[in-house]
Amino acid sequence: MNAAVCELIECGLQASADERASEGLERALAACAGELEQTRARLAEAELRREAAREREQARARIERALAERARHELASCPQCREPVRGTDLLVSGRCPTCGRALTALLSPRPQLGAPDRDEYLALLGALGGLVGLALASTSENTD
Ligand SMILES: [Zn+2]
């Protein structure tokens, strides 16, 4: 009789321990599922950011190619030798490729109604020149 009671009590304790273990496993599983969900969400965000960065890079490359192409066009003539000068001569080297004369005077806006501030205009052109130089460097495989 005593042995049977002891066995029953042991079985009850074992069942209770199994139940606690099972609850613990369920909690751990739920925590893992939550972490997996967060990881998937972070991965999706990172992929969206990567795709946006790739599109920005493609747009930047297109703009640089277009700018470099435009800068290679002839757009004025040298005031001294009358040879044609290109956008790159005006904006990057600042000199006539034929006679070497400084071309900065060509960049100066004529005094007229609505003309830009001279210093602002020259600063803007200087920045544009830097951009053109970068564009030419990054597309140099297409030069000549
Ligand atoms: Zn010249």
Image (cartoon, rainbow, N blue to C red):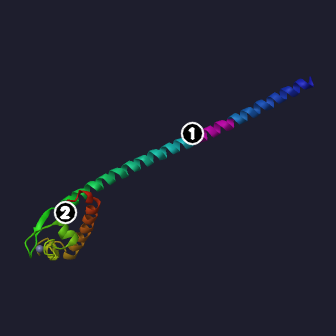
The residue type indicated by label 2 comes to Ala
Q: Is residue 85 magenta?
A: no
Name the quarter showing ligand 1: bottom left
Bin the neighbour count of mark 1 within 10 Å (Cα to Cα): few under 14, some 14-19, many 20 and up. Answer: few
Q: Is residue 28 left or right of residue 136?
A: right
Q: Is residue 27 magenta?
A: yes
What's the residue at 24%, 70% (across, down)?
Answer: 124
State the extent of the magenta-drawn residues as a range. 23-33
Q: Position of residue 14 (x, y in %)?
A: 78, 31
Q: Position of residue 113 (x, y in %)?
A: 11, 72
Q: Earlier in the sequence, mark 2 or mark 1?
A: 1
Image quarter of the C terminus = bottom left
Q: Which residue is mark 2?
A: 71
What's the residue at 28%, 62% (across, down)?
Answer: 137
Query: How far is disc 2 from disc 1 in space, using C-alphas?
Result: 57 Å
Total count of labels: 2
